[in-house]
Amino acid sequence: MNYLSTRGAGAGERHTFSDILLGGLAKDGGLYLPAEYPRVSADELARWRTLPYADLAFEILSKFSDDIPAEGLRTLTRRTYTAATYCNVRDDESAEQITPLKTLGIEDGAPLSLLELSNGPTLAFKDMAMQLIGNLFEYALAKHGETLNILGATSGDTGSAAEYAMRGKKGIRVFMLSPHKKMSAFQTAQMYSLQDPNIFNLAVEGNFDDCQDIVKAVSNDHAFKAKYKIGTVNSINWARVVAQVVYYFKGYFAATKSNEERVSFTVPSGNFGNVCAGHIARMMGLPIEKLVVATNENDVLDEFFRTGIYRVRKAAETYHTSSPSMDISKASNFERFVFDLLGRDPARVLQLFRDVEEKGGFDLAASGDFVRVKQFGFVSGRSSHADRVEAIRDVFERYDTMIDTHTADGLKVAREHLQPGIPMIVLETAQPIKFGETIREALLREPERPAAFSGIESLPQRFEVLPADVQRVKDFVVAHTGD
Ligand SMILES: *Cc1c(COP(=O)(O)O)cnc(C)c1O
């Protein structure tokens, strides 16, 4: 399997899965994609239907990473996808399934269900990929005797998923910046209660944007970055995207009886990482009817899929919403889909994303490319805070099921795209406890709390308060990377 950049640089070069595993952007600023998508045969699909999650993950990942020995990969997937790791199930569903499908009911003739992706250690879907990344990184670093210092900024979900994936991993340290006293008590406790010596929580006296700016400044200091082996685990990481392909297959098998059937997925979206994995599953041949992109008030993606206009937002136009993990100004994985939409023409992708940098966006409506969006199954919708509150209330009353604000966004938009006889699977991206304030507003009661999280707010916390100052963060990294 060879990987290429969406912007075409180094077209003759070979890049394996391992080559791009620890990196971010390609040299030309593009994103990596396989030179061609592996296709799944009817026989394979039939054989995969009954596989346990870890073995399904092995089958799918091995199609994208043929440079990793099969034995090693199987060990990694079996170590990652265990019932003990994805144990935060609610009701009496089996953790063995890793991503159980919860049937809600039939609406407009379509079976409607939730695919639970948030049973992992931090109660958000990012655990699905990040846990695998932790094991893959450790494996790759050990092979070459290398170390990696992961630097990141978080307002909650990404940072905790990364820390829980990297804790105790050999050769890896995590320096995670978060805004001091600005996260919920629950999210703060999730991160700061980790006592592992390779995890460093830096509470920055500023807001999330200050944290992000510091990470950018450090990453732009190429000498520092190289000397201290600074890396990231953000959502453009290819291995993260590919790990997410697995649960589209798993959800499809759970919602159907035969491989003749088609299903649709609705995906609460921000950076287009999760739904990009759905697009890849569809390109591999999984019988997906529609991929419904659901956004909140930050509707960059909904605007594109309705009009063909991609327009990134300025900071002042980016709203802080009750589904904060989807509060984005641009969708960092979107370029991967644009590459496919334009028939994999890197010169045009390069031009369009130059337009994004120089003019703030591009318009495909007039060019004739936009009509092809339908062939890829994409449709979209958006929600407001009131919509999400209403969806949380309705699902609780009608189906006795509590959903979080991001999943509520998905559910609201899914209902606008139901087709009789075609199962609609909404991806559940987080558990309600993470966004308790809106649950209390909608239901006038406390969110459900998985047993493992009782009383975490009173555990001892380990963090360092730092001013919003690039040099102070660098100094901290230097002081804590001595071997
Ligand atoms: C990250 C996140 C999203 C958005 O996922 P993308 O891959 O960025 O589109 C949605 N919901 C939750 C709870 C998240 O943490």
Image (cartoon, helix red, strand yellow):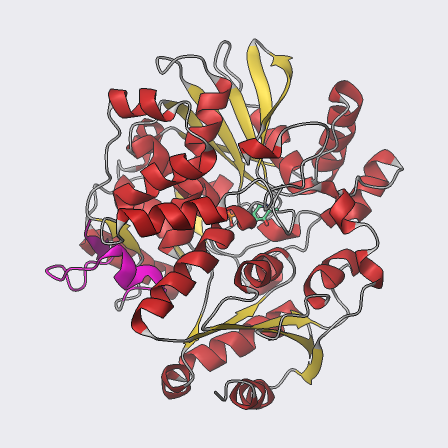
Query: For the point 55% across and 45% down, which residue is it?
Result: 299
Query: For the point 26% across and 67% down, which residue is it?
Result: 28
Q: Looking at this view, is 218 or 417 the one in front?
A: 218
Where are the magenta residues, as a range? 1-26
| Residue 365 shows in the view | no
x, y percent for residue 241: 40, 48
Q: Residue furthest right?
A: 444
Q: Looking at this view, is 221 or 370 the one in front?
A: 221
x, y percent for residue 274: 47, 43
Instruction: Tell me the quarter of the picture where residue 245 sits.
Output: top left
| Residue 88 shows in the view | yes
Q: Would you place residue 76 above or below residue 386 in this image?
A: below
Query: For the point 47% across and 70% down, which residue is it?
Result: 170
Q: Would you place residue 50 above or below residue 310 in this image?
A: above
Q: Residue furthest left?
A: 12
Left or right side of 405 for 27? left
- Secondary structure that dominates the magenta span: loop
Q: Total of numbered circles in the picture?
A: 0
x, y percent for residue 444: 89, 37
Left or right side of 468 for 449? right
Q: Would you place residue 298 above or below residue 383 in this image?
A: below
x, y percent for residue 3: 22, 54
Question: Quick check: is 234 in the magenta stretch?
Answer: no
